[in-house]
Image (cartoon, rainbow, N blue to C red):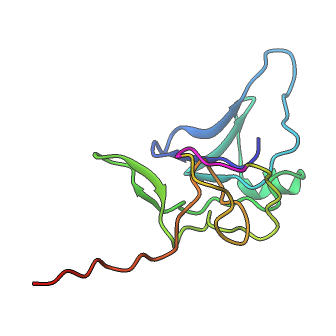
């Protein structure tokens, strides 16, 4: 699981839920994810903190910070704000070349976390004769 943003607004629901009746499932190769949730991980009925998740070797470059999306309420706009911690994370090695809008990636120093590549280049205001 790499390069994702998960926002969970229900304080009783985990961002990740791993369950198996016969084993304790694990995930490998998790990095550059933004898990914005009160409860991070439920595994076999027990809550696991993000710090424990990282100590187990996952998401060394991940975060639980608010991803700072334009709007998660109506009207929904899941684009990244320029101040988002998901913009240009150091060390990101994603080879994705286009985002969910068809925009080129990366636009900055590295590929942004999530499906959207933030277009943080300010545009000049239109000047019209009055």
Q: Is residue 121 magenta?
A: no
Q: Is residue 17 above or below residue 57?
A: above
Residue at image coords 52%, 71%: 120
Which quarter of the rendered picture does the C terminus lie within? bottom left
Residue 92 position by quadrant: bottom right
Which quarter of the rendered picture does the N terminus lie within? top right
Residue at image coords 71%, 67%: 89
Residue toward you, 87 or 73: 87
Looking at the image, which residue sits at the far left? 130
Q: Is residue 100 magenta?
A: yes
Q: Which residues are magenta?
A: 97-101
Residue at image coords 66%, 47%: 4
In this rendering, would 18 be left or right of 101?
A: right
Chief secondary structure of the magenta span?
loop
Residue 79, position in %: x, y? 47, 55
Residue toward you, 57 or 116: 116
Residue toward you, 76 or 25: 76
Q: Is residue 82 above or below residue 5?
A: below
Residue 73, position in %: x, y? 32, 48
Looking at the image, which residue sits at the far front? 129
């Amino acid at each position: 699981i790499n390069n994702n943003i998960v926002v969970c607004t229900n304080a009783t629901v985990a961002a990740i839920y791993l369950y198996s009746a016969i084993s304790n499932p694990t995930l490998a190769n998790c990095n550059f994810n933004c898990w914005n949730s009160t409860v991070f991980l439920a595994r076999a009925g027990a809550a696991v903190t993000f710090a424990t998740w990282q100590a187990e070797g996952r998401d060394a470059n991940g975060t639980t910070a608010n991803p700072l999306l334009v709007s998660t309420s109506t009207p929904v706009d899941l684009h990244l704000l320029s101040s988002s911690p998901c913009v240009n994370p150091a060390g990101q090695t994603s080879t994705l070349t286009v985002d969910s809008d068809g925009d080129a990636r990366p636009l900055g120093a590295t590929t942004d976390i999530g499906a959207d590549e933030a277009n943080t280049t300010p545009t000049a205001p239109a000047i019209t004769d009055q």
